[in-house]
Amino acid sequence: DAGITQSPRHKVTETGTPVTLRCHQTENHRYMYWYRQDPGHGLRLIHYSYGVKDTDKGEVSDGYSVSRSKTEDFLLTLESATSSQTSVYFCANGRNTGELFFGEGSRLTVL
Amino acid sequence: DQQVKQNSPSLSVQEGRISILNCDYTNSMFDYFLWYKKYPAEGPTFLISISSIKDKNEDGRFTVFLNKSAKHLSLHIVPSQPGDSAVYFCAGTIKGGGSYIPTFGRGTSLIVHP
């Protein structure tokens, strides 16, 4: 257990509104990730971070931005939410061997 | 282009029998492979892994086999139990930016019948 807490766990919002999802870890893992899970698509990487202020894009980064100002927090922002961003979002941290530890997920619905 | 493919969306097995979940990959640069298990409304949990330099890794009822020449790996669960019913994700990783970046398959839903 790598102590990942995601907030909010559920959110309903309207198209065009900004949304920020927060991921907090209680351990000081250097690596943190944001994935989205959609039916038929599995888990797809949005962005990841390998240190404070060090982030990079994943395969589905369009429409998303991230920030990591502290080791323990990794924020995912949708500047202007669209219905295609309705999904379950998972934050994870992990060792440099690739073993990730996931949070419980944040379910986002964009109407 | 899918780098990690799980071609069977679902698998049904009788309790006590063997479950075999398959995974194919296209990227020969993967260093490490992992299997994750996911229950509904929960986050995925790490199950077992294997380095690309090995061909087998075993942990209790779970064994992962890697065939690099065929770019294929499989997860064997023996004996299968009803509590194993979940979605299983296969992932391959490449080191980038100082970290391993896992690429996941689409998952296989395993149902173990009592």
Image (spheres, coloured by chain):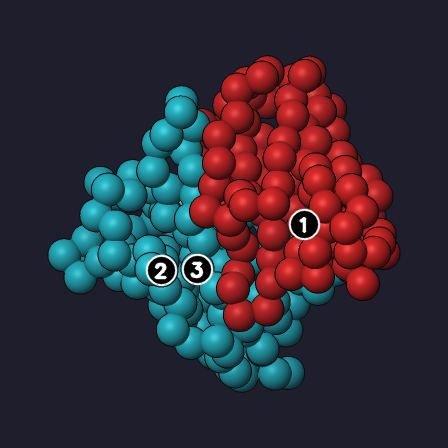
Chain colours: A red, B cyan
Residue type at mark 1: give it: Tyr
Nearer the viewer's eye, disc 3 or disc 2? 2
The disc label shown at residue B105, or none: 3
Residues indicated by labels 3 and 2 sit on the same polypeptide chain: yes
Pick the front one: B28 or B45: B28
- Regarding mark 3 in the picture, which secondary structure is present there? loop
* Quadrant of the snapshot with the C terminus of chain B: bottom right
Q: CA distance from mark 1 to mark 3?
A: 16 Å
The disc label shown at residue A89, or none: 1
Q: Give how far across and how far down residue B95 sits, in percent.
A: 35, 32
Pinpoint the chain carrying mark 1.
Answer: A
Pick the front one: A109 or B99: A109
The quarter of the picture where residue B66 lies is bottom left
The quarter of the picture where residue A4 lies is top right
Q: Are marks 3 and 2 in contact (CB under 8 Å)?
A: yes
Q: Give how far across and how far down residue B101 sits, in percent.
A: 43, 38
